[in-house]
C-alpha cells in the first residue's frame, strides 16, 4: 500500500497516541518506545492523524486517542537451534527467520470507538547462503520493521475510511432547530453537517428535503 491510498484530511485529527508492544501476547515494554516513534511518524505522514503529546492536565488534550497494539509472534526456529541441529555454520547452509506480527488499532473520539483487529504482516530475514525468490522486495534489515508497520497502519486507516466509520466518528452532531412555529405540520428542521442541506420532518415521520 501507498500513502496515496489513504485520503488526507484538510484538518487532521489531533489524537493522543497510545502504544503497546507485545511478544507472543505478553507486554514487552522495551518495544514500546520504538513502536511509538515509528507509529507517530507514519500517522503524521498520512495526513489523517496528527499525534499529540500530553504532558500535563493543562495541555491541549486533542480530539481523542489512537491506540496501537502490536504483537510479535516469535519464530520457533531460532538461529541457535538451527545451527545446533544442522551442525554447520548458518553462513554455509542458510536460514530464513520470520518475524510475524498482528496489530490492532482503535480510534476513540467523542466517546465513540472504532477498531480494527487481526491486521497481519511479516518480514523474513535471510541469513547465510540463501537465494531470494523472484518477485520478493528486498531492503536493508534496519528498514524492515518500519516498512512493515507502515503497511499495517495504512491498511487499517484505509479500511476505516472505506467503511465510512472514520468520517462520521469525528464529525459534530447534527444541529436540530425547533421549527413548528414557522411552518405548521413540521416538527423540526435538521441541518445535515456533511451535505449542508436541510431536511424537514413532518409529524408522520417522513423526511422531506427542502
Image (spheres, rainbow, N blue to C red):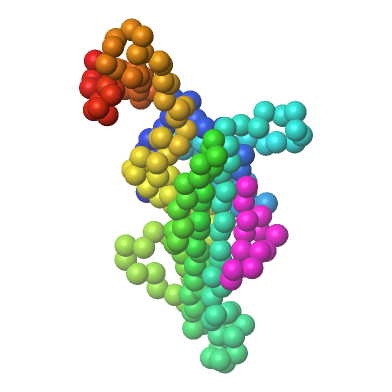
Q: Position of residue 12 (x, y in %)?
A: 49, 30
Q: Position of residue 185 (x, y in %)?
A: 27, 16
Nearest the viewer among 103 and 94 is 103
Q: Can residue 193 be seen by looking at this rendering?
A: yes
User: In the rendered structure, does residue 91 fall within the stretch colored magenta?
Assistant: no
User: In the rendered structure, does residue 26 fall within the stretch colored magenta?
Assistant: yes
Q: Position of residue 206 (x, y in %)?
A: 24, 28
Nearest the viewer among 204 and 116 is 204
Q: Quadrant of the C terminus?
A: top left
Nearest the viewer among 184 and 134 is 184
Residue numbers of the magenta segment: 18-32
Query: Relative to residue 209, is residue 116 depicted above or below?
Result: below
Q: Position of residue 10 (x, y in %)?
A: 44, 25
Nearest the viewer among 193 and 83 is 193
For this view, does 192 lie left or right of residue 114? left
Q: Residue at x 46, y 64 (%)?
A: 122
Amino acid at each position: 500500500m501507498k500513502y496515496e491510498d489513504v485520503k488526507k484530511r484538510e484538518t487532521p485529527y489531533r489524537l493522543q497516541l497510545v502504544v503497546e508492544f507485545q511478544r507472543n501476547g505478553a507486554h514487552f515494554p522495551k518495544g514500546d518506545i520504538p513502536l511509538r516513534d515509528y507509529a507517530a511518524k507514519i500517522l503524521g505522514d498520512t495526513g489523517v492523524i496528527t499525534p499529540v503529546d500530553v504532558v500535563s492536565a493543562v495541555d491541549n488534550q486533542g480530539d481523542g486517542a489512537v491506540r496501537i497494539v502490536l504483537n510479535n509472534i516469535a519464530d520457533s526456529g531460532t538461529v541457535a537451534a538451527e545451527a545446533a541441529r544442522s551442525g554447520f555454520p548458518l553462513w554455509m547452509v542458510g536460514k530464513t527467520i520470520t518475524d510475524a506480527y498482528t496489530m490492532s488499532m482503535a480510534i476513540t473520539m467523542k466517546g465513540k470507538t472504532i477498531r480494527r483487529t487481526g491486521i497481519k504482516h511479516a518480514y523474513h530475514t535471510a541469513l547465510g547462503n540463501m537465494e531470494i525468490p523472484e518477485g520478493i522486495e528486498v531492503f536493508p534489515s534496519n528498514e524492515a520493521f518500519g516498512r512493515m508497520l507502515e503497511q499495517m497502519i495504512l491498511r487499517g486507516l484505509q479500511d476505516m475510511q472505506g467503511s465510512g466509520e472514520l468520517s462520521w466518528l469525528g464529525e459534530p452532531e447534527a444541529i436540530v432547530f425547533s421549527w413548528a412555529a414557522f411552518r405548521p405540520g413540521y416538527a423540526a428542521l435538521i441541518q445535515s453537517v456533511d451535505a449542508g442541506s436541510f431536511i424537514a420532518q413532518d409529524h408522520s415521520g417522513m423526511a422531506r428535503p427542502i
